[in-house]
Image (spheres, helix red, strand yellow):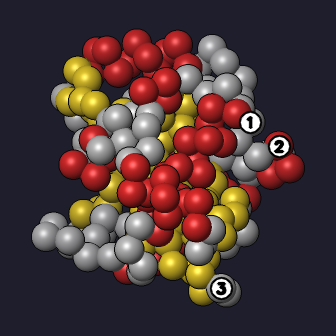
Amino acid sequence: MISINTLLEGYRKGVFPMSVDGLINWYSPEHRGIIPLEDFHVPKRLSRLLRQRKFRATINQDFIGVISACASRKNDSGNWIDENLITSYLALHSVGHAHSIEVWSADQLVGGLYGVSLKGAFFGESMFHLTSNASKIALVVLIERLKERGYRLLDVQWLTPHLAGFGGVEIERNDYLNQLDNAMRFECHFDKTNIS
């Protein structure tokens, strides 16, 4: 397990952990993906889906369900979320620095995301969906919360076409570190009821 202090210090310095073959490595990409909150836009088809209210979204209601679903996803390079990291993020969640957005269809968890909140920055870690568009709905809910609470930076680690569709961009490491330093000057609370 990575200690809470080590995790928070890593995020404060602009690095994030991933597990590769059971070993924790820390990453600071040369090109970092972010979603500028002021440039975020919801694609038209998703806007229509949101108006239909087929899904229900919650915040911090099933963190373990979300991170477990994210960990069960496989991609070409395997999975970087192992039991060690799950335990570490559960500890971070218990002190109010890791948060989840859940998307439900009836009573079934069909999508969501989780990440880390520190000062005026939110670091998106992973998302999943079992139903088409469910993770996109989670992202919309996340960004609404970040704007509402005055956050300055949404770090998505690496830019994907999916995230670019919401206004995500790639910036150089030095630019990212400057934006991170600025975000650390603001005291934002993702969910005050869960801050210890």
Q: Which mark is drawn over residue 106?
A: 3
SS of the residue under disc 3: loop
Say which residue appears at 63% left-offset and 32% top-offset.
147
* Discs 2, 1 touching: Cβ within 8 Å: yes
Give the amino acid type for the residue marked by disc 1 in the picture. Answer: His
Tell which of 119 and 33 is nearer to you: 33
Query: Crowding near pointer 2: few (<14 within 10 Å), some, many (20+)?
Result: few
Name the residue rendered at 65%, 85% in the picture: 106
Q: Nearer the viewer, residue 171 or 52?
A: 52
Tag 2 secondary structure: helix
Q: Nearer the viewer, mark 1 or mark 3?
A: 3
Disc 2 to disc 3, how far (Cα)? 27 Å
Give the label, 2 or 3, closer to the camera: 3
From mark 2 to mark 1, how far is it between C-alphas?
A: 6 Å
- In this view, the residue in front, 4 or 157, is 157
Q: Position of residue 16 (x, y in %)?
A: 39, 43
Relative placement, left or right, of 129 versus 28 is right
Q: State the image coordinates of residue 3 (x, y, percent, origin top left).
A: 57, 51
**As drawn, 35 above or below 94:** above
Q: Disc 1 marks which residue?
A: 189
